[in-house]
Amino acid sequence: GNSVTQMEGPVTLSEEAFLTINCTYTATGYPSLFWYVQYPGEGLQLLLKATKADDKGSNKGFEATYRKETTSFHLEKGSVQVSDSAVYFCALSYNPGTASKLTFGTGTRLQVTL
Amino acid sequence: GAVVSQHPSWVICKSGTSVKIECRSLDFQATTMFWYRQFPKQSLMLMATSNEGSKATYEQGVEKDKFLINHASLTLSTLTVTSAHPEDSSFYICSQGGRGTQYFGPGTRLLVL
């Protein structure tokens, strides 16, 4: 079946440090890939997505590239801020539309300190 | 983005009682809502897909008679955990589909004693 594997957290970084959160997936065919973020006390929010191989999703300084050859969708940011502290979830689905089922990774908690 | 609320945010109940969790879409009408469950340090697991005006579609291994889902309107879906037991303790999250993505509620933490 489909699955998503994320690096275990927590990840603790100093402000302005470079961030990478690894995500790999197992799936048949060509899924769409997503990163969701959950800030404390809030629901998950879509951060970025990519729907086909070699696509790069980007938002708020975060980027992730859909690498089919390595089945990966690693999240990166060049300079993190304290406000980026949250839990990040990698996910996949076979339909980027609204009624599609999402398969999630376990989430990676990021803590950014001054 | 759309705002989804859940009530209650957390609940403690005795074993054998039933608990109802509400999921409301505050500014968007959704024909489809999803219910997820999350155990500590594990993924969100889809429990069921709720369609307004029709029966919910449950994922394999999820007992439909234990987790009753009602999607009575375009802005409200409810999940009732019937005869709850300690193993039902978990974090329950709803989401609604809309505008090319899903919008998630903040979750409800259930503790069954």
Image (spheres, helix red, strand yellow):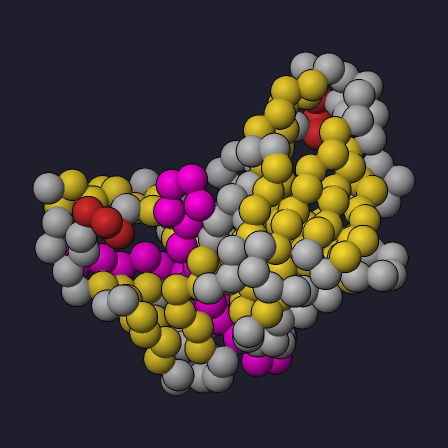
State the extent of the magenta-drawn residues as a range. A17-42
In this picture, residue B103 sits left or right of residue A59 = right
Q: Is residue B60 left or right of residue B28?
A: right
Residue B2 vs residue A26, the one in the foreground: B2
> Which residue occupies 55% across, 75% down?
B100
Query: Residue A33's spot in the image, x, y percent?
Result: 49, 71
Identify the residue at horizontal 10%, vertical 42% (top origin).
Answer: A114
Position of B59 relative to A57 (above/below): above
Closer to the camera, B30 or A65?
Answer: B30
User: What residue do we see at 61% from left, 55% from top?
Assistant: B25
Tell whether position A45 is magenta: no
| Image side of residue A75 versus residue B24, left or right | left
The image quadrant of residue A100 is: bottom right
**Can the viewer see residue B34?**
yes
Foreground of the two, A55 or A42: A42
Please state the horizontal and vertical placement of residue A103, each as a whole percent of the image.
Answer: 59, 60
Q: For residue B103, which quarter of the picture?
A: bottom right
Which x, y percent locates residue A96? 57, 76
Marks counted in the figure total: 0
Residue A15 vs residue B52, the one in the foreground: B52
- Would you say residue B109 is visible in this rendering? no
Residue B36: percent from the left, percent from the top? 64, 48
Placement of B30 over or under B23, stated as above or below:
below
The reply, left or right, for residue A35 in relation to residue B67 is left
State the quadrant of the N terminus of chain A: bottom right
A26 w.r.t. B59: above or below: below
Residue at position x 36%, y 76% in the image: A57
Q: Which quadrant of the structure image shows residue A68?
A: bottom left
